[in-house]
Image (spheres, helix red, strand yellow):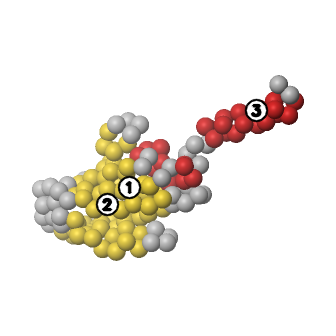
Amino acid sequence: MAGGSRSILVLVAMVVLTLDQTSLQVSALLGGTVYVRLTNRLEPSNATVTVHCKSGDDDLGDHLVALGETYEFSFKNNIWDSTLFFCNFDWVSASLGKSVSGTFDIYKARRDQERCLHDCNWLILETGLYSYTLRTKIWENLYSWPQ
């Protein structure tokens, strides 16, 4: 193998190894569309929840999500892997006898790319927001409602 060809081969190997180590950082370039799904499981209140999600660039507006229904939106991560969507949740809890509201970062690229990859599924429960984590294969409570 000629010296120039060997150098190119070494350079390609280094790039491949670097991409493997930083795969989360380059996922915006290679990763495709991310889907966020929020499913209302507010039992025993059977409440409809108002969900309002935003990013720095997009305001998705208010959405009424009845018990058992799912609100879904999708997007592509930016090339800096800094995509952030946050959502505000409001409903009246019959079991607590009061209005409940909270705001949570529903998608943070650096937190969620490995945790949920392209399908970020959330359950809205009376105890908080639960998200399915691919690594552990369980629903984890990532946010509890303010008291």
Q: Earlier in the sequence, mark 1 or mark 2?
A: 1
Above or below, comparing residue 136 to residue 59 in the picture? above
Could one spot residue 128 in this view of the protein? no
Badge 2 element: strand
The image quadrant of residue 69 is bottom left
Which residue shows up at 12% across the image and 56% down it? 44
- In this view of the protein, which residue sits in the foreground, 39 or 3? 3
- The number of numbered badges drawn on the structure is 3
Amino acid, disc 2 = Glu
Q: Which residue is mark 3?
A: 9
Which residue shows up at 47% across the image and 44% down it? 114
Asked if marks 1 and 2 touch (Cβ < 8 Å), the reply is: yes
Residue 71: give x, y in percent of width and height. Answer: 28, 62
Could one spot residue 107 in this view of the protein? yes
User: What label does residue 72 carry, if any?
Assistant: 2
Asked if marks 1 and 3 touch (Cβ < 8 Å), the reply is: no
Residue 45: give x, y in percent of width and height. Answer: 13, 60
Badge 1 element: strand
Which residue shows up at 29% across the image and 57% down it? 38
* Distance between mark 3 and mark 2 Cα atoms: 44 Å
Amino acid, disc 1 = Tyr
Kindly report which numbered mark, 1 or 3, lies closer to the viewer in this rendering.
3
* Distance between mark 1 and mark 2 Cα atoms: 7 Å
- In this view of the protein, which residue sits in the foreground, 73 or 49? 73
Q: Is residue 6 left or right of residue 116?
A: right
Residue 90: give x, y in percent of width and height. Answer: 26, 69
* Distance between mark 1 and mark 3 Cα atoms: 38 Å
Q: Which residue is mark 1?
A: 35
